[in-house]
Amino acid sequence: MLLCVVLSRLFGRLIHVNHVGNVSKKGPINMEYSDGNAPIPLDTTTRLAIERTRVAYERTVMAAIRTATSLITFGFSAYKFFQMDLFDGRNARPESKPTSLGPKEFGLTLIALGLLALMLAWLEYHRDIKTLRKEYPMMPRSNIGIIACLVAVVGAGLLVIVLLNV
């Protein structure tokens, strides 16, 4: 349900309704609304500075997505690797003395850490873009949220697999 709400919000914002009610595809930043009614053209320097800031925010969230993906995959791989018995190919290990941090706990920790890092990075990105959009409402929308959402869904699925010992 939450995934559907996020995706509908992302796709619903790809089309912009301008101040006279016409629907248009979002284009490059070229106008600023000073009083909400009359568009004021931005100079090239300001427009490019806004674009550089927006792209820097996207690069930052992409780095967080890359880091989260690495943590999630490494946690799941470590869990599955230590679950295997390398000598005779069986997947079940004999019961041994319980430890505080076994393969399952290690995998769960890394997967949860990856999901937490992804969530915090997305919240920071959303906050920064919202602040920037208040100043420059004609700023184009990004589809980076779809990638972040897909990584979060895969990470949550792997977390459930590790929790259920599948």
Image (cartoon, grey):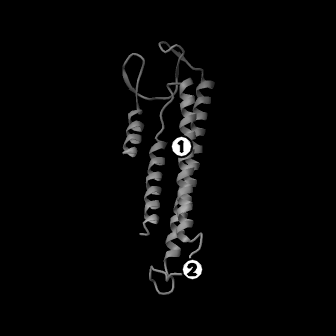
- Residue 65's place in the image compared with 78, above or below, is above
Helix, strand or loop at disc 2?
loop
Q: Position of residue 153 (x, y in %)?
A: 43, 53
Quadrant the C terminus occupies: bottom left
Helix, strand or loop at disc 1?
helix
> As drawn, which residue projects farthest toward the bottom?
88
Choose the circle earlier in sequence order: 1 or 2. 2
- Binning the other alpha carbons within 10 Å of mark 1 as few (below 14), some (14 to 19) or many (20 upward) gives many
From the image, tell me which residue sits under label 2. 97
From mark 1 to mark 2, how far is it between C-alphas? 40 Å
Q: Please, what is the three-letter code of the amino acid marked with disc 1?
A: Trp
Q: Position of residue 154 (x, y in %)?
A: 44, 56
Marks 1/2 in contact by CB < 8 Å: the verdict is no
Q: Quadrant of residue 120?
A: top right
- For residue 71, the mark is none
- Is 65 on the left-hand or right-hand side of 161? right
From the image, tell me which residue sits under label 1. 122
